[in-house]
Image (cartoon, helix red, strand yellow):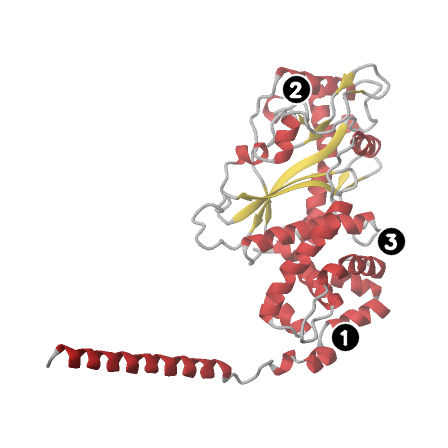
C-alpha cells in the first residue's frame, strides 16, 4: 500500500473519531438536560409562599409575637427593620427571574447564625435550594460587615473617643485610664482543603484566631480575625496591626492622665489576663505564684473585674449566635465573614436597644451582689460545650521596668483612700 492510500485511511479514521466525539458531547448535553425537574417541587414559588418560614413563621412573629421574633433573629422588630433598610441597597438583585426578597435573605441569614442549624435544614425550612443557601450566607454577612462596621464597630481614632471609653471603665468598673479589655479565642472550623496542619491547634481541632478589644458596655471596638490556629500563641498578639500601632505609638491615645483625686499621672492602657505581655499600654495581673502582699492581690482583683467585660462580651456573642456552638463548615473566607458579621450584629443590637434589653438581660451576664460578690451569668451554662476556646499565652511574662513601675503605681492607688472600693478586701 503506497503512502497516498495510508494518508487517506488515516484521514478517514480521524474524521470518524471527530464525529464520534461530537456525538458523545451531544449525548452528554442531552443527559444533563434530562433532569426530572428544573426546580424541585418543594422549592417552587408557590410552595415557598405557602409553606416557607419567611412567608409564614417570620411574618407572623413580626406582626404578632415579638418575643418569638427575638428568638428567631436576636433582635426586635424596630431593629430588624432598621437593619433591613440599611442593607437593602446591597442585597437587591436584578435578574430575568424574580429574585428572592431581600427580607427573606436577611431573615434566613439571621436565623442560621442565631441557631446554628445545618445548611440543609435551614434551606428546607425557608424552601430555597442548598446551593442558594450557600451563596446567600456569605453575601449577606459581607453586606452586614460593609454597612455596619463603619457605624458600630469602628476603632476609635480620636482622643475624645478613647477618653469616653476610659471614663466608662472608671465609673462602671473602677479601673482608671483603661481604654478597653482584650482577649483572644480559637474558633473551630472545618479543616480547609490542602491546609495541612496550618490550622491545627493545641486543643486538637482546626481553628482560626479571633482577637478582640471591647469597651465597658460589652461592645467590640477592634477585631483581628484569621490567624492560623497552629500559630505560636506568643506571636498572635504581636502580629496584629493594633499591637504594632501601640508599640510604635501611632494610635491616637490621649497623653497620660492623673489618677482621680491625685497628682500621679499614668498612661492609658488595655487590660488583659496573664496570657498577655506586660506593657505600658497593656496591664496584666501579677503572677499568682509570686504574690508578695495584699496590694498585689487587690490589683489582680481590680484588673480581673475590669477584664471580665471582654469575657462576658465573648460569652454573649457565643450564647446568642449559636453558629459558634459547633465547627463552622464553610470555606475560610465565609467563616471570616460570619465572624465579622456576628460581631457587628452584636454591637448593633446593643447600641440600638432603645426599648428593652432582651439581648443582654440582667441575669444573662455576670453581675455583682450587694457586697461585691460575683454572680455568674446564664451565658456561662449555655456555652459549656461551645466551639470557641480561649487563646493561650500570647506574650512574655517579663515587662519593661516602666511597665512594671506603672503597674505598681496602680496597685498602690487601689489600696489608698482615694482609689479603694469598700468590698475589695473581702474579695481576696
In the depicted structure, whether residue 93 falls above or below residue 166: below
In the depicted structure, whether residue 269 falls above or below residue 348: above
The answer for how far apart the CA atoms under marks 1 and 3 are is 26 Å
Q: Quadrant of residue 95?
A: bottom right
Say what secondary structure mark 3 lies in.
loop
Say what secondary structure mark 1 lies in.
helix
Q: Is residue 199 left or right of residue 407?
A: left
Q: Quadrant of residue 102?
A: bottom right
Viewer can see residue 213: yes
Residue at 50% in and 39% down = 231
Residue 329 x %, y %: 55, 58
Evaluate if marks 1 and 3 touch, with contact meaning CB atoms under 8 Å apart. no
Image quarter in which the C terminus is found: top right
Say what secondary structure mark 2 lies in.
helix
Evaluate if marks 2 and 1 touch, with contact meaning CB atoms under 8 Å apart. no
Residue 243 x %, y %: 62, 31
Earlier in the chain: of badge 2 and badge 1, it is: 1
Q: Quadrant of residue 126?
A: bottom right
Which residue is labeled 1 in the image? Answer: 56
Give the number of the disc on residue 403: 2
Residue 359 x %, y %: 78, 53
Please name whichever residue, 355 or 315, is drawn nearer the observer in this view of the structure.
Answer: 355
Residue at the left extreme of this rendering: 1
Earlier in the chain: of badge 1 and badge 3, it is: 1
Which residue is labeled 3 in the image? Answer: 356
Please name whichever residue, 309 or 109, is drawn nearer the observer in this view of the structure.
Answer: 109
Amino acid at each position: 500500500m503506497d503512502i497516498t492510500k495510508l494518508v487517506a485511511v488515516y484521514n478517514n479514521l480521524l474524521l470518524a473519531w471527530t464525529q464520534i466525539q461530537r456525538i458523545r458531547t451531544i449525548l452528554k448535553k442531552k443527559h444533563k438536560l434530562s433532569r426530572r425537574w428544573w426546580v424541585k417541587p418543594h422549592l417552587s414559588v408557590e410552595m415557598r409562599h405557602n409553606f416557607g418560614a419567611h412567608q409564614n413563621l417570620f411574618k407572623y412573629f413580626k406582626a404578632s409575637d415579638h418575643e418569638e421574633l427575638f428568638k428567631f433573629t436576636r433582635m426586635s422588630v424596630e431593629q430588624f427593620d432598621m437593619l433591613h433598610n440599611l442593607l437593602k441597597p446591597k442585597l437587591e438583585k436584578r435578574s430575568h427571574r424574580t429574585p428572592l426578597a431581600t427580607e427573606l435573605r436577611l431573615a434566613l441569614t439571621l436565623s442560621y447564625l442565631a441557631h446554628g442549624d445545618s445548611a440543609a435544614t435551614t434551606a428546607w425550612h425557608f424552601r430555597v435550594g442548598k446551593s442558594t443557601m450557600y451563596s446567600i450566607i456569605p453575601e449577606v454577612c459581607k453586606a452586614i460587615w460593609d454597612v455596619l462596621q463603619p457605624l458600630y464597630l469602628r476603632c476609635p481614632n480620636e482622643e475624645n473617643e478613647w477618653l469616653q471609653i476610659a471614663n466608662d471603665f472608671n465609673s462602671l468598673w473602677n479601673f482608671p485610664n483603661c481604654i478597653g479589655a482584650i482577649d483572644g479565642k480559637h474558633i473551630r472550623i472545618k479543616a480547609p482543603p490542602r491546609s495541612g496542619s496550618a490550622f491545627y491547634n493545641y486543643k486538637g481541632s482546626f481553628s482560626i484566631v479571633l482577637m478582640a478589644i471591647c469597651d465597658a458596655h460589652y461592645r467590640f471596638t477592634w477585631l483581628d480575625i484569621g490567624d492560623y490556629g497552629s500559630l505560636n500563641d506568643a506571636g498572635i498578639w504581636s502580629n496584629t496591626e493594633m499591637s504594632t500601632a501601640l508599640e510604635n505609638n501611632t494610635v491616637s491615645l490621649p497623653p497620660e492622665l492623673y489618677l482621680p483625686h491625685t497628682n500621679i499621672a499614668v498612661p492609658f492602657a488595655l487590660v488583659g489576663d496573664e496570657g498577655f505581655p506586660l506593657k505600658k499600654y497593656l496591664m496584666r495581673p501579677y503572677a499568682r505564684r509570686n504574690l508578695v502582699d495584699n496590694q498585689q492581690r487587690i490589683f489582680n482583683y481590680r484588673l480581673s473585674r475590669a477584664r471580665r467585660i471582654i469575657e462576658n462580651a465573648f460569652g454573649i456573642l457565643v450564647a446568642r449566635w449559636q453558629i459558634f456552638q459547633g465547627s463552622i463548615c464553610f470555606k475560610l473566607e465565609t467563616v471570616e465573614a460570619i465572624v465579622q458579621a456576628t460581631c457587628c450584629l452584636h454591637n448593633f443590637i446593643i447600641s440600638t436597644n432603645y426599648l428593652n434589653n432582651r439581648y443582654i438581660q440582667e441575669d444573662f451576664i455576670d453581675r455583682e451582689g450587694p457586697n461585691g460578690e460575683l454572680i455568674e451569668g446564664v451565658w456561662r451554662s449555655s456555652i459549656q460545650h461551645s466551639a470557641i476556646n480561649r487563646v493561650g499565652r500570647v506574650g512574655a511574662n517579663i515587662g519593661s521596668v516602666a511597665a512594671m513601675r506603672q503597674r505598681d503605681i496602680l496597685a498602690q492607688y487601689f489600696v489608698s483612700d482615694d482609689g479603694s472600693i469598700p468590698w475589695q478586701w473581702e474579695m481576696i
